Amino acid sequence: MLSQQTIDIVSSTAPILQEYGGTLTKHFYKRMFSHNPEVAPYFNSAHQAGGTQQRALAGAICAYAANIDNLEVLGSAVELIGQKHASLMINPEHYPVVGENLLASIREVLGEGATDNIIDAWAEAYGVLADIMIGREKQIYNDNAEKFGGWAGFRTFKIDKKEKESRSITSFYLKLEDGGALPEYLPGQYITVRMRTPNGSTTMRNYSLSDKPRLDYFRISVKREVGIKADTPKGYVSNKLHDDIEVGDLIEVGPPCGEFFLNLNNHHERPLVLLAAGVGITPILSILKSAVESMPEREIIFVHGCLNEDIQPFKAIIDKLAVTHSMLKIHYRYSDPEMEGINRKGNCSTGFVDAKLIESLVSDRHADYYFCGPRPFMVNIYQDLLKWGVPSNQVHFEFFGPKEELQKTA
């Protein structure tokens, strides 16, 4: 338990951290990678270059300071971070490294404003948070290891099949090298792929499982990240998977993790609305395939937004599901103009996925919503659902970055 003095001091720093959060976290990462380069493999270089990792940490620090006297409200954030940490195999010995660099960064960025009392209070507060995270991550590691087919750490998988889904997305079917059975996962979860880098280190990436849970293989569907923006490097792992990894090759994989999933034990009469944009379709497809099997009487609406038909993945699979499941309604939304020879009609249209389109498809706004895609798509959907007054327990999403960014204009 935190002392009241610590609670008061940390709470008083919330406005300062809100003002200096971005500067603080940029300094923190630069400092940590300089003083402790051994932790670099646990971080995504593209997210570092684009600033999303820094913004996510800044949001988490500010939320912790603002709610230091009522940590129960941070339960969902703890779960999200715990699942992410477990997917990357974060261990208790990593927390002192982060704590030391965080406290040093607070002192170095705030200067004279970072008094000994403030540093001591944050040291105590960080210690409590670290204990909470270590405890939850231990539970996740134990659960993953103890379930049928489960394991701890990384295991060697063989590429059993490689299948091109679109111009930019390829699916990889993964089987254990030793031929063993796989653990059942929750539709919407992801696995971690670890690869060697040219400098002899390793790097890790999370990829959503794009098929319904099954015991014979995992499937991930990976978009080639070309790094078209100046501040975003080309994706090392995605390009290596596309260009260098072939059927029969071996890769290292961690067990399924993630707090974004459809609970198949919950059966509701209200509609289930699944919204995807771009490669955000990967976890949504897993949820869709699972839902039509386990909830055949439930109204399900599926919408996929993408640029055009040429880069659209999984259309044949989804169309087949719609033919065999009468309660499933699908719609494809393309943001590019129609190409020559294409006539969009029926369940296809031109534009963006927005509230008007969703309302034209659902029988009742009072539904369960699951969505995943690029930031502008996520922001717009989230804000539309807020305006509709949809309860938070009916809004589920996979989003990298602080939740506060969803409340900003796209």
Image (tube, rainbow, N blue to C red):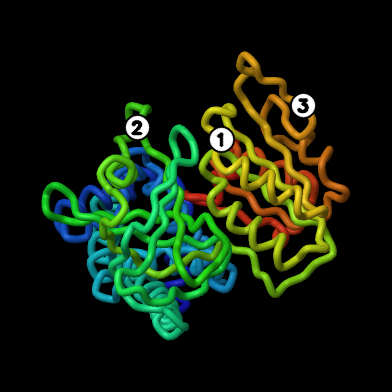
Placement of the C terminus among the 4 image quadrants: top right
Q: Dot 3 surroundings within 10 Å: few (below 14), some, or many (20 or more)?
A: few
Residue pictured at 74% horizontal, 57% vertical: 368
Location of mark 3 (residue): 345
Which residue is rendered at x = 51% and y = 42% of the image?
A: 279
Callout 1 crowding tier (Cα within 10 Å): few <14, some 14–19, many ≥20:
many
Q: CA distance from mark 1 to mark 3?
A: 16 Å
- Is 110 in front, or is 181? 181
Task: Locate residue 293 relative to residue 89 in the image: left or right.
Answer: right
> Could you say whether the residue bearing mark 3 is in a helix, strand or loop?
loop
State whether residue 130 is above or below residue 163.
below
The percent coordinates of residue 78 (x first, y second) are 49, 68
For marks 1 and 3 on the same chain, the one whose residue lies earlier in the sequence: 1
Locate residue 75, reporting x and y percent.
55, 70
Quadrant where the N terminus is found in the figure: bottom left
Residue assigned mark 1 = 312
Q: Earlier in the sequence, mark 2 or mark 1?
A: 2
Q: Nearer the viewer, residue 108 or 332?
A: 332
